[in-house]
Image (cartoon, rainbow, N blue to C red):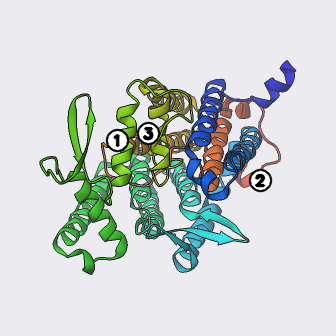
Amino acid sequence: MKEIFSRMFYSDRIIWIIFIVLSCVSVLAVFSASSSIVYKHGNQFAPIFKHVSFLILGFVGVVFLQRVPTKRFIKCFPFLLLFSIGLLVATLLFGKAENNAQRWLTVAGVSLQSSEFAKLALIGTVAFLLSKMKPENVKVVFWLIVALMGITCSLIVFDNLSTAAILVFICLIMMIIGQVPFKYMLQLVLAGVLLGLVCLLLVSVLPADKLPSRFATWKARVERFSDNKADDETLKYVEVNGVKHYYDVDGENAQETYGKIAVANGIKGIGLPGSGWARDFLPQPYSDFIFAIIIEEMGMLMGLFVLSLYFFLMMRGGFLAARSPKLFPKFLILGLTLMLVCQALVNMAVAVGVIPVTGQPLPLISRGGTSTILTCVYFGVILACANIRDEEEKPDTTVDEDIANVEY
């Protein structure tokens, strides 16, 4: 039995522990937060069985991927990026719209979220290009990264602004760590700031009915987030610790309101999973606001524990990247770890009311097919890159000669 577990958990044990603990938290949280789905379909266990099946499938994928030599990934990511761009275009043309956002593409009865594939593919491709960067080709590599980043994020941004923003941020961090010359980075940042200011000016000046639907949605979310109506006596209020907080609970900000109420109730925690009430009012308690459900039912300490898991993931990812003797796995670990942690922090910030609603799931905890499977792929690839020292000791003789001889 010990040998079986040793073979199964072959790679870095700390990453494995974080993965397993997050999966366990996910099962408890999704089981509790899926009450609306249970009510709709009349089957108490169907939602959690479906979610657990995705986790099991993802677990098998992690076990397999951790033993794949990182040299195998080199040729995969550019083709995966082309495939992802094709999926994004198909999603814009034929995708299924939900909540004014066209993010899902149905293929053979299976709904796919194209942006999830694009995130993995772009990060892997940027890691590969940065590993190939040399003084004589730095300009070509830089502009190639910018072009791929621009094409991918421009296809994502209109239906998923937060994902595009996080992806751009991750790529910029990877380029900084990859020592792209400062003058190029300064030009890119200034161009991005200028573009952002122009878009912000247009959104603030034009009326909502003149804006594209998603622009109007972003504007409304920011306005609701920044609008303070505490002195309006016509609004309902929630009293927390003796302080009255006024909200239009029945209006468009109901999602943010019930999320804040859930967090306020969770200072001490209501009790066991399934004992909270906000899950019955939030539109997507099992996805966007699952962190609020965790805090409400299991207390602030549980929320801090979940936050610490992502913190330790970031620390361990940084350690594994620093230890890697090769550039490609180093950049790949950093990029994937940053994506997981940044996405988690954005989700948590939305749940506690720090930033406007963005629609980012909590990695590996939120319910979802594509996001759960691909988050498991992230962990599998990180674990594979953690084995780079073993690859050095046992070179893979089956790899194509043109890759085996490359300083990746």
Residue 333 seen in the current view: yes
Secondary structure under the numbered disc 1 in the rendered image: helix
**Residue at the (52%, 31%) spot, across then down:** 313
Which residue, given by chain and number where applicable, does mark 1 sit on? Answer: 260
Residue 176, visible in the rendered structure: no
- Disc 3: CA contacts within 10 A as few (<14), some (14-19) or many (>=20): many
Question: The disc labelled 2 sits on which kind of residue?
Answer: Asp
Q: Residues within 10 Å of mark 2 (few under 14, many from 20)?
A: few
Residue in view at x 44 percent, y 27 percent: 269
Dot 2 falls on a residue whose secondary structure is loop
Where disc 3 sits, the SS reads helix
Residue 150: x, y in percent?
Answer: 42, 66
The quarter of the rendered structure image containing the N terminus is top right
Residue drawn at the location 79% of the way across and 31% of the way down: 8
Tell me the residue that label 3 is attached to.
292
Picture quarter containing residue 184?
bottom left
Task: Kindly identify which numbered label has been placed on residue 72.
Answer: none
Residue sticking out furthest to the left: 231
The answer to whether residue 234 is left or right of residue 162 is: left
Measure the C-alpha gap from mark 1 to mark 3: 8 Å
- Residue at image coords 80%, 24%: 6
Contact between labelled residues 3 and 1, with CB atoms less than 8 Å apart = yes
Specify which label sits upstream in the sequence, 1 or 3.
Answer: 1
Where residue 196 sits in the image (x, y, percent)?
Answer: 26, 63
Amino acid type of disc 3?
Ala
Q: Residues within 10 Å of mark 1 (few under 14, many from 20)?
A: many
**Quadrant of the frame with the C terminus:** top right
Query: Could you give the CA–CA distance between mark 2 and mark 1, rounded to whole angstroms?
Result: 55 Å
* Mark 2 or mark 1: whose residue is earlier in sequence: 1
Which residue lies under the disc numbered 2? 400
